[in-house]
Amino acid sequence: MMTPAWLLAVAAVGFPPSIGQPIERIVSADDTIIDMARRYRVGFTEIRQANPGIDPWLPGAGRTVILPAQHLLPRWMAPDLESGETRILINVAEMRLYVLFADPATPERGRVVSFPISIGRQDWRTPLGSTRIISRIKNPTWTPPQSIREEALARGETLPDVVPAGPDNPLGQHALRLALPGYLIHGTNRPAGIGMQVTHGCIRMYPADIAWLYDNVTVDTRVDLVNQPFKFRWVEDALWMEAHAAWVPGSPDQQSLETLDAALAVALAERPGAVVDLDRVREIAASALGMPEPVPLLARPERLTPELPEAEQRPGSGENPP
């Protein structure tokens, strides 16, 4: 059985700088990128970023497609294993949700789990900041807010007052209500849209992924929503970088450059004396492939590790949730 690329066992002292490994698959004649995204539990945009120029509907039989199932952990106030606090991190820039399990009461303690998500489109952006889960709902009903009713009317559609639980419910079968009024982490009855900016601000997940999350987090779990398009992590003495397209298309180049420089400065502060190839850093940022890449060091530290180490992974199927 194939090991889930998004699930990694870590040492008891803390959490890893990276999780998973990249996967390559050969496209069949009937495959689309949406098919492959759902089969391997990655996001639609992630696959397109990792395979520039690919046709999402006719990727080409026999073509090798890279599935970006390896990720550097974003930086935020993550728990350590001593705190015992499990947390959720949502990085809107990469449209991905992370769970760090530190609770000694759970068998998942010391693991990081990551899932692709959909986030709010440009006119309904997902908010940033810290919040908590305030309730868990199975088979939720949906009461469309007035703003969404008006939007539907503009399209010539009339929404019901309440959409009952069932196959036509856009919230799917599981939902986690956040302390941010009106916002949920939920499933969907249209999984083809996972990994896109298509929601009205909520976090949308594949049905199997939200079912697993529902079963493995509790009310009062902290949720941090951040925007980190550029991630840097040291793996021993090698610096790795992961870059994603701007969360807000058309962001000024200067703003992107300042964000990049700030992220790099944090990483370099951890290795005084290290000097990086800035041209290569900016090339990785511009390409925004969404996969970890090594950054050449021009001076110290002396010992470099050319590739990310493999870690022991939990047995399971890469196509199904644990």
Image: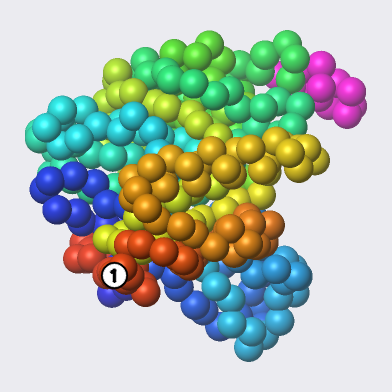
Residue 215 colored magenta?
A: no
Can you say whether 159 is above or below 2 in the image?
A: above
Q: Residue 181: image x %, image y %?
A: 53, 11
Crowding at label 1, few (<14), some or many (≥20) Cα neighbours within 10 Å?
A: few
* Visible residue check, residue 140: yes
Q: Which residue is mark 1?
A: 303
What residue is drawn where x is 85% and y is 21%?
153
Is 4 situated above or below 160? below
Q: Quick check: 186 left or right of 119?
A: left
> Residue at image x 11%, y 48%?
12
Report the magenta residues as a range: 149-160
Residue 168 visible? The answer is no
Q: Quadrant of residue 5?
A: bottom left
Q: Position of residue 1 (x, y in %)?
A: 28, 74
* Residue found farthest to the bottom: 62
**Residue under the point 54% across and 24% down:** 128
Q: Residue at x 44, y 13 (%)?
A: 179
Q: Nearer the viewer, residue 81 or 143?
A: 81
Along the viewing direction, whichever of 3 and 147 lies nearer the viewer: 3
Q: Examine the image and state in which quarter residue 218 appears.
A: top left
Circle 1 sits in a helix, a strand or a loop, which is it?
A: loop
Residue 127 percent coordinates (x, y): 58, 23
